[in-house]
Image (cartoon, rainbow, N blue to C red):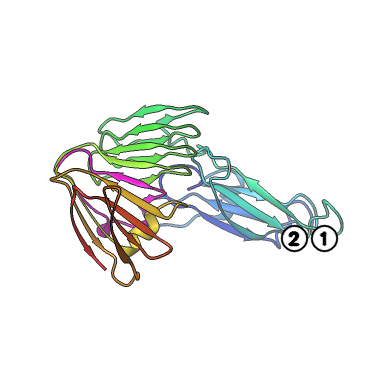
């Protein structure tokens, strides 16, 4: 999501294009949008619905390889990587790789953080919050919100499952259910809607989370561990079948399940049904 609106974007490399000389190459970034339709690449060159990245010189073949670079600079926006295999920057055909940082190109943001710790609070309306660097607090007031934590140990609070997209970013990030009686069923939502979360806090009281192995794989961040916090009255329903998990018993107040690549830790006070 290069422009931070909560919709996936598309990157297309056209290394045979000639914007800055023969075979200089060009890369197109199409911003995602709701509904269907088509868009001409020429409109991207003009900055409408996306943008284009031109190779610097003839025979650069810029766009020969393109990809999602993740959030390289920790600002909460996805970045784009473009390879130019024919660039002569450090010698004949030495090649060059470019990182193009994402940003609020579509002016979708309603709340934006800065370099340090921020506290961003939403309303019941649909909103987009990008916290950036620092240990941030993001409060969704409901609606189809987009919450991007960016770099740092962030806390993201929701009231229900109506959010459009949540990405904790790098660091140890916590998703907290700040309401009571909420059933968060991750098996019914797209995997891309919830990513890079290391802790799930059922703090509101009487809350339930339901997920399968594929949901766990997509949700957890680089630590590959999800720790679920909660109290008596909260519940976890986890179907880990097919994942070769082992029940390690209770460790430091948490029921622990591990398969050598993923780890699930559930507060022992929480009611749980775990299928291995």
- The residue carrying pointer 2 sits among few (fewer than 14), some (14 to 19) or many (20 or more) residues within 10 Å by Cα, namely some
Q: Tag 1, which secondary structure?
A: loop
Q: Tag 2, which secondary structure?
A: loop
The disc placed on residue 93 is 1
Q: How far, Cα to Cα, is label 1 from label 2?
A: 7 Å
Q: Which of 59 and 269 is in front in this view?
A: 269
Q: Mark 2 points at which residue?
A: 85
Q: Residue at x 24, y 47 (%)?
A: 161
Contact between labelled residues 2 and 1, with CB atoms less than 8 Å apart: yes
Q: Where is residue 265 in the image (x, y as percent from the top left)?
A: 31, 53
Which residues make up the magenta segment? 183-205
Q: Which residue is drawn at 38% across and 65% down?
A: 259
Above or below for 24 versus 122: below
Above or below for 225 versus 151: below
Q: Nearer the viewer, residue 100 or 13?
A: 100
Viewport quadrant of the C terminus: bottom left
The disc placed on residue 107 is none
Q: Which of 99 and 45 is in front in this view?
A: 99
């Amino acid at each position: 999501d290069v422009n931070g609106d909560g919709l996936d974007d598309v990157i297309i490399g056209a290394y045979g294009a000639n914007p800055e000389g023969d075979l200089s190459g060009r890369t197109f970034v199409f911003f995602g949008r709701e509904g269907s339709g088509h868009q001409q690449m020429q409109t991207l060159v003009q900055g409408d619905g996306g943008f284009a990245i031109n190779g610097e010189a003839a025979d650069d073949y810029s766009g020969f390889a393109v990809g999602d670079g993740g959030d390289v600079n920790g600002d909460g926006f996805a970045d784009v990587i473009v390879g130019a295999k024919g660039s002569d920057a450090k010698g004949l055909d030495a090649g060059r790789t470019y990182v193009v940082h994402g940003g609020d190109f579509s002016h979708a943001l309603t709340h934006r953080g800065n370099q340090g710790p921020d506290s961003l609070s939403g309303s019941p309306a649909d909103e987009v919050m990008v916290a950036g660097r620092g240990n941030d607090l993001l409060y969704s007031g409901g609606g189809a919100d987009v919450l991007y934590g960016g770099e740092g140990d962030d806390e993201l609070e929701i009231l229900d499952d109506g959010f459009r997209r949540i990405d904790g970013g790098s660091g140890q990030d916590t998703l907290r259910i700040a309401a009571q009686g909420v059933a968060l069923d991750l098996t019914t939502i797209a995997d891309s809607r919830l990513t890079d979360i290391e802790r799930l806090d059922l703090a509101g009281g009487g809350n339930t989370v339901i997920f399968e192995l594929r949901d766990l794989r997509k949700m957890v961040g680089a630590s590959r561990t999800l720790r679920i916090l909660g109290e008596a009255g909260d519940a976890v329903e986890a179907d880990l079948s097919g994942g070769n998990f082992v029940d390690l018993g209770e460790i430091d107040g948490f029921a622990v399940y591990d398969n050598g690549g993923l780890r699930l830790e559930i507060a022992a006070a929480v009611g749980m049904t775990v299928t291995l």
